[in-house]
Image: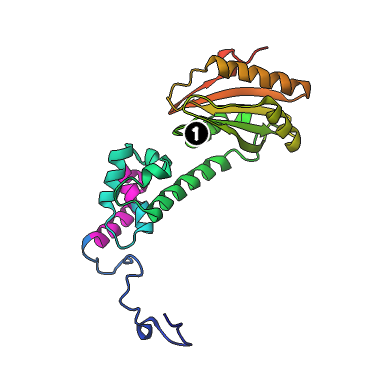
Amino acid sequence: MRKAGKGQGFAEMGLASLPLGLPQTGEAEPPGHLGHRARMRDRLLTAGPEALADYELLEMVLFLALPRQDTKPVARALIARFGSFANAIAAPLAELRQVEGVKDAGAAALKTVQAAALRLARAELLDRPLLDSWDRLLAYLQASLGRARVEEVHVLFLDARNRLLADEVQGRGTVNHTPVYPREVVKRALELQATALILVHNHPSGDPTPSRADIEMTAEIRTAAAVLGIVVHDHLVIGNGRHLSFRREGLLGA
């Protein structure tokens, strides 16, 4: 494709017929799925996202990645496979690619939405004491871990005012086990100059009841951290839509 010269317009370049976007207000509505897109866009802007069903939100996300394709069948296939908008954007890439019509562009669009949601939830935690923002913390952890298919152990490292310094993955494992090494947790806390920790891990089964290994691991980390004056505030176990707090259940020890 040649570059446009000074003063040369799209018509002279042979690009006037390309569909560069959806019609603006006042323009004639195009036929087929492009008209459907315009109506959905207007409904989103006038009535808000709550006016759209889960599959319609997925359609709108996929619009951006598949501009020349009718995305309704793809969106409905995603809902049939995963059950909801949230489950679809959180699904592993390998499973997304198994849905007919979802290629790299569509999968990337869905994962971009998931990343944006996590960053928004995380932003609600920054520069404020986590112990005073418990509901926001739980919302963030549910978004990041509630639908994970394998077990992950995270450590939230906090400063002297209990503000978040870092949320780091200390281990990934199978559906029911992840090895964690107390020495590595404490070493990382010292590197970040953290004075407190919140331990977090998920149970892919959805049941947040801790195992004996969870309780023993927590005690080992508390003991190692206490030697260096680092406090373990809690250990949270995240299930899909459920959670358990070691401190609230009396499992954290004296």
Assess whether residue 205 is covered by the magenta stretch.
Answer: no
The quarter in which the N terminus is drawn is: bottom left
> Which residue in the structure is indicated by mark 1?
145
Q: Against 28, is 201 above or below? A: above
Location of residue 85 in the rendering, given as x and y in whole percent from the top left corner: 36, 41
At 47% from the left and 31% from the top, the residue drawn is 150
Prevailing secondary structure of the magenta residues: helix
- Quarter of the image for residue 79 reads top left
Assess whether residue 46 is covered by the magenta stretch.
Answer: yes
- In the picture as drawn, the residue positioned furthest to the left comes out as 31
CA neighbours of label 1 inside 10 A, class few (<14), some (14 to 19), many (20+):
many
At 73% from the left and 21% from the top, the residue drawn is 224
- Quarter of the image for residue 189 reads top right
Q: Amino acid at mark 1?
A: Leu
Location of residue 145 in the rendering, given as x and y in whole percent from the top left corner: 49, 33
- In the picture as drawn, the residue positioned furthest to the right comes out as 228
Location of residue 27 in the rendering, given as x and y in whole percent from the top left corner: 28, 69
Location of residue 103 in the rendering, given as x and y in whole percent from the top left corner: 36, 53
Of 176 and 36, nearer the camera is 176
The quarter in which the C terminus is drawn is: top right
At 44% from the left and 21% from the top, the residue drawn is 207
Identify the element where label 1 is drawn. Answer: helix
- In this orientation, does residue 94 appear? yes
Q: Against 16, is 141 above or below? A: above
Magenta stretch, residue numbers: 33-59
Q: Residue 85 vs residue 112: left or right?
A: left
- In this orientation, does residue 53 appear? no
